[in-house]
Image (spheres, coloured by chain):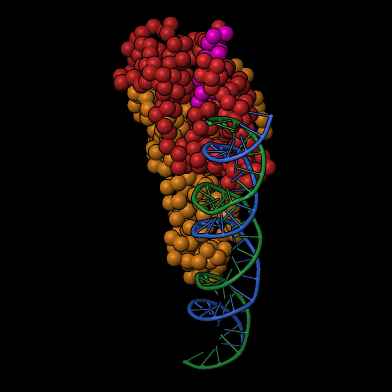
Chain colours: A red, B orange, C green, D blue
Amino acid sequence: MGEAASTTTPRERYRQQVRSEIKERAWEQITAAGTSALSLNGIARLMGLSGAGLYRYFTSRDELLTELIHDAYQSLVGTLRTATAQGKGDLSGLGQTLRMWALDDPQRYFLVYGPPVPGYRGAADVAALAAEIMDILTDACADVPDVPDAPVITPGAPLEDGSGRSVGRAGTASAQRLALSFRTRLHGVLSLELSGHLAGMECDPALLYQAELDLLAAH
Amino acid sequence: MGEAASTTTPRERYRQQVRSEIKERAWEQITAAGTSALSLNGIARLMGLSGAGLYRYFTSRDELLTELIHDAYQSLVGTLRTATAQGKGDLSGLGQTLRMWALDDPQRYFLVYGPPVPGYRGAADVAALAAEIMDILTDACADVPDVPDAPVITPGAPLEDGSGRSVGRAGTASAQRLALSFRTRLHGVLSLELSGHLAGMECDPALLYQAELDLLAAH
DNA sequence: TGTACATCAGTGAACGCGCGTTCACTGATGTAC
DNA sequence: TGTACATCAGTGAACGCGCGTTCACTGATGTAC
């Protein structure tokens, strides 16, 4: 049993350590100059390795990028889950949490909600995480009265996440509708702010965001 | 007078012709694979020229890109102005016009409202065009009653566009406030749709967009 | 109308760069007896 | 405890590619007398 219990041999531990340092450097590159600046050779240089050495850890640049995107999604899901667990699971709390998370690393936000990364096609993996985010939001909208709205949402089949848990299609149609507006409206303010498109104007992005959020939270 | 009247010598006309073909090819590249795919050598290849030949027409890749961004802004301004002139200058009409324009060339939309292009710093030129767009929207919001809102907008100095016309800071505070929501909310739906982030969900982007637009148009 | 000259579009070769990726290898770390 | 072997991290050189950009040039188009 001693063997099965500690699956992590020293070598395996080292391996994971290097893998995560590679990812850290990768994030530095992305944060500094966007996704297109992600370069295996550049990372190797930063780490004092030869470029070829990285191929022990990632089979290709695409694999690394895919994993980064996956991590970005998981970070957001985790952050929203934590906020919910801390009693900030209402729309107002989630809205503020989302903004903090986005400002913390704008490029990471765009990796999740920005224009598609050229060449990258999302795994089913990521679709489940995206659906999970919507579920969290929909839960926060649970107390909205269920008045059948305009037919914006049409029912569809639920997804399954990695552990076989059913995901997506939670809550009433009205709750889903509100969650959707939550996402699009806040994304509108946030993405324009992060892109610098509100900078030229005489408006305070934080106040604008809060105003939109208040309106949503009032049902 | 015969000389001053026709400024366009045949050579000059040819020159403009080639310049605009270069831009056309550039748009093809951007449409197909995003801004990062823009390549002078690639354009030359498409046109059957040598790469060096393009330097007769643009001094650098950056100059070409700058001009494309400028053109994108001008296209949007022109489209909105035309809609206004055709009696579709209300919020509902402008909203639909905006969506058509965006769907017509998503990459062009992202050049205007997307994440900043790496390496590119916007000219003052473009700031004036951006302000002009806001003016058009604010005009469409002129009939909203002027109830001083939350202090989202703080007054600032107006800009000047190329011809010295004053631009920006039109309309009442309430009108500006509404125009701002128009921009952020519709951008929220539109950019998520264009990025494919609504594709996995069971919602119709067109209906969602229309629903948000209707809400705005109702003041 | 013809000749001499200037302008300018476009070429082809080259420079230096950085990229992703492969491959044969060295040397250290771990494992089995 | 020591020896023989397997595993695996990392190296260095190389491949082929495409990029932006420069430069000396050829040849056609336009201009001036």
| Boundaries of the magenta span | A73-86
- Depth order, front residue of A56/C29: C29
x, y percent for residue A147 = 34, 9
Would you place residue A46 above or below residue B174 in this image? Answer: below
Q: Is any atom of residue A144 visible in this view?
A: yes
- A79 inside magenta stretch: yes
Would you place residue D22 above or below residue B92 in this image? Answer: below
- A76 inside magenta stretch: yes
- Depth order, front residue of B191/B149: B191
x, y percent for residue B203 = 35, 24
Identify the residue at image location x=37%, y=20%.
Answer: A160
Q: Is residue A153 left or right of residue A17?
A: left
Would you place residue A118 above or below residue A74 in this image? Answer: below
- Depth order, front residue of A20/A108: A20
Q: Is residue B120 left or right of residue A90?
A: right
- Depth order, front residue of A205/A1: A1
**Quadrant in the picture for the N terminus of chain B:** bottom right
State the predominant SS element of the stretch in magenta: helix
Identify the residue at image location x=58%, y=26%.
Answer: A9
Identify the residue at image location x=34%, y=26%.
Answer: B204
x, y percent for residue A57 = 55, 37
Q: Is any atom of residue B152 visible in this view?
A: no
Give the mark count: 0
x, y percent for residue C9 = 51, 69
Identify the residue at image location x=51%, y=51%.
Answer: B38
